[in-house]
Image (cartoon, rainbow, N blue to C red):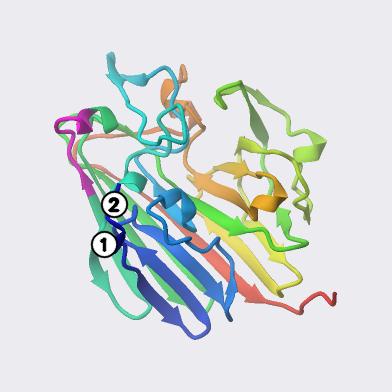
Amino acid sequence: MPDLNSLTEVELQHESLRLSVCPALGGAITRLSVDGIDLLRPWDGSDSVRRTGCFVLAPFSNRVGDGGFMHEGTHYPLRNLSAEHPLPIHGVAWKRAWSLTEQTSTMLRLTFTHQPEGDGVRDWPFAFRVEHEIKLDDTGVALQLRLRNIDSRSMPAGLGWHPYFLRHEACQLQFEAQGVWQNDAQNLPFKKATIPAEWDFSSEQSLQQPGLDNCFVGRTKPVTIRWPNEGVALTMHASESLDHLVVFTPPADMGFFAVEPVSHANNALCMDDPDANGIQVLQPGETMQVSCKLQIQRMARTVQ
């Protein structure tokens, strides 16, 4: 658990666009606003990265079942790093302090290096280095991740982001996908299915209460979120390899929802064919790179 006194924020600004990051708290984005309107859930100041606005998913996304995974004939156990979840979830990087390696008024670069030493072997058994670059410009926020295998062995890998968007009143969501994984009692995927009508956001619609915590597959187009009462629209342009989308819609009174661009299916590490479900295998020295542009536009407010 990080020391609250060490949880200082670094702020970027470009005109009316502001973004803050806390390197010591999982390198998380703690605030994103335009004209003073928050788009991500603002950090509550606690030592929990799950109470921030967005964090990096590396070197895997979402849950891993079976107490670990197989890779090239060897079983690697994983321990759970989050007391709020019964299974290993979201990788390692969100639970560790990052280093700020470069900063200007509109750009910063964070890095985190994992070495599988001591108990760290059960966090993730391979050594890796991840770099997160964040830039503000006239159109919004540009995010880029680079994950490098610095181990002497090949390593399965995945990447993504976990943004918590504010659920302002009358929020609208739109995205297209080819299918969705249905979950079992542990929230692990067990069946790839056609998207049911109540989960179909191919046409823009109000978020309502779909009760989702599911991974959609085959995303090819940008994701659009609109807050008409605030007069703001956000379009998420993610890398082609981030063709999975985890959508989490807790009860509306919690005030947020998550739309997570990721490279692989939930629990892909334990599937019969991890590669077919988005896992990449990095040889020693190889790098995986993904990007995500959050294009932010002002529009006329809806008259209330």
Taking the view exactly as shown, the residue that stands out farthest to the right is: 304
Pick whichever, 126 or 52, lies toward us. 52
Please give left or right for residue 48 compared with residue 122 in the image: right
- Disc 1 element: helix
- Image coordinates of residue 92 in percent, x first then y, are 32, 40
Neighbours of disc 2 within 10 Å: few (<14), some (14-19), many (20+): some
- Which residue occupies 47% across, 32% down? 85
- Image coordinates of residue 53 in percent, x first then y, are 49, 58
**Please, is residue 17 above or below residue 213 in the view?**
below
Taking the view exactly as shown, the residue that stands out farthest to the bottom is: 15
Q: Name the residue under label 2.
A: 2
Q: Is residue 72 visible?
A: no
**Please, is residue 213 above or below residue 24 in the view?**
above
- Disc 2 element: loop
Report if residue 100 lies within the magenta region.
no
Q: What stretch is highlighted in magenta?
A: 113-121
Pick whichever, 95 or 153, lies toward us. 95
**Please, is residue 38 above or below residue 262 in the view?**
below
> In the rendered picture of this protein, how many numbered marks are placed on residues?
2
Pick whichever, 233 or 272, lies toward us. 233
Q: Which dot marks residue 277?
A: none
Q: In which quarter of the image is the C terminus?
A: bottom right
Determine which quarter of the picture holds residue 143: bottom left
**Please, is residue 95 above or below residue 27 in the view?**
above
- Image coordinates of residue 108 in percent, x first then y, are 32, 69
Q: Mark 1 points at which residue?
A: 6
How far apart are the alpha carbons under marks 2 and 1? 7 Å
Q: Is residue 94 visible?
A: yes
Pick whichever, 254 or 212, lies toward us. 254
